[in-house]
Amino acid sequence: MATDVQTYCDCMARIRHRINVVQTIMSGGIKIGHADQTAELIFIQFRKTLEEIAFASLSANKEKYAEVHANFSKHWRAKEMLAVMDTVNPNFYPVPLPAPIETAPGHKHFGEPLTDGFVTRDDFAFLYKCSSEALHTRNPYKEGDPTINIKYTVQEWVVRFQRLLSWHCATLLNGDRWVVNIPCEGNVHVYPATPTV
């Protein structure tokens, strides 16, 4: 059975893979031939990335993970999903960090958490809603502009996900805090977080 750390790393590795799929699509490495279907493929990656972010924080409590995961099928709005996550783990959302500075051999220090340029909780709710709109077939009789406002370009969303997760602090349900690094390739690394005095 996978450890809590391995479960978290697996979630983060799946996120990296999904973001890589989006980048491959954007660079022309995956060609579908239809703009609508290309958008659907991109936005399913984004939606599942958001869900992985939420689920990863429950990795220290398998029972709560199973309970929340089972109920997610009932939540079609990100605000409802976030509200459920908040009741289970109010600190579930990753805190993005700048790259560390080595202060002594084997000791690294992180500056203050990043304050912009990443997927915020508000962005989470916004992108979840946009992704849902992109994945559902539009009613052919619906009036108005069929264009979906996605706030940022697809590439900007990719960069914002990378900035959120490349180095981040995760607070799990049991109170443990981890510093997590998701390199461009290779293994995801998790280190126990020790606050400075």
Image: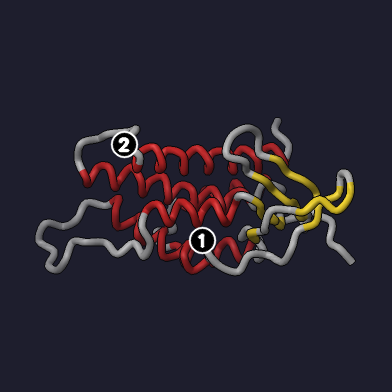
Q: Nearer the viewer, residue 191 or 105?
A: 105
Which label sits on residue 136? none
Task: Read off the residue under disc 2.
Answer: 28
Task: Read off the residue under disc 1.
Answer: 119
Residue at the image point whose x is 71% and y is 55% from the top: 172
Q: Calculate the distance from the C-alpha at mark 1 to the C-alpha at mark 2.
A: 25 Å
Callout 2, which amino acid? Gly
Residue at the image point whose x is 74% and y is 53% from the top: 100
Residue at the image point whose x is 52% and y is 63% from the top: 117
State the image coordinates of residue 87 (x, y, percent, origin top left).
62, 66
Crowding near pointer 2: few (<14 within 10 Å), some, many (20+)? few
Quadrant containing the N terminus in the rendered view: top right
Which residue is the extreme one toward the left? 141
Residue at the image point whose x is 19% and y is 55% from the top: 138
Earlier residue among tags 1 and 2: 2
State the image coordinates of residue 128 (x, y, percent, origin top left).
41, 58
State the image coordinates of residue 52 (x, y, percent, origin top left).
54, 48
> Compared with residue 44, is residue 156 higher up or lower down, i.e. above or below?
below
- The part of the image, by quadrant, that contains residue 129 is bottom left
